[in-house]
Image: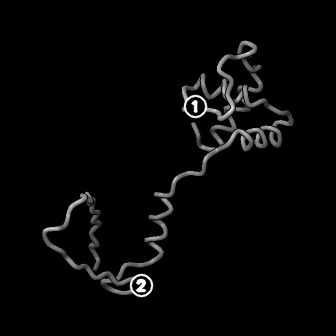
Amino acid sequence: MDNAEHIETIVLLPHKSPDSVINVKVEFGEGEGKVPLDTIAERAKKYQPKPKITYKMIQEYVEKKYGFKVHTAYIAEVKRSLGLTMYDAPHMAEELKHPRKHPPKEKVEAITDALEYFEVI
């Protein structure tokens, strides 16, 4: 098999009984006509969802790399300014007690670096 072909199939699974059935036999392993398991594992890694990056992870990264702490409000403000998805906080106040404070430039750069490091942006 010098000229191996790549075939992908997309299947729509309706909620009705099938009109007919096609049985497919796939053999895994090494050798002609078999699907190698390493290839399946490699392809599966590509489709795994990325882990959710938490504010705590961003805070730890910034503190370790830059030596200072950043408040979650600063992280939220940077994300907001970049147009990133914001999730509802479970204990979020309906009205802010204080107006939002814009983070200093060095903290914006550190948070942006962390977001790049975690491949959020």
x, y (%) of residue 100? Answer: 71, 16
Extreme top residue here?
99
Extreme bottom residue here?
31
Quadrant hosting residue 112: top right
Task: Pick the quarter of the image with the C terminus.
Answer: top right
Which residue is painted at 76% across and 26% down in the image? 107
x, y (%) of residue 86? Answer: 58, 31
Residue holding disc 1:
86
- 103 left or right of 34 in image: right
For marks 1 and 2 on the same chain, the one whose residue lies earlier in the sequence: 2
Which residue is painted at 55% across and 30% down in the image? 84
x, y (%) of residue 8? Answer: 29, 63
Identified by mark 1, the residue type is: Met
Report how far apart the C-alphas of labels 1 and 2 lie in the structure.
45 Å
Identified by mark 2, the residue type is: Gly
- 80 left or right of 93 in image: left
Binning the other alpha carbons within 10 Å of mark 2 as few (below 14), some (14 to 19) or many (20 upward) gives few
Quadrant hosting residue 94: top right
Foreground pick, 70 / 90: 90
Residue holding disc 2:
29
Which residue is painted at 18% across and 67% down in the image? 18
Above or below residue 7? Residue 105 is above
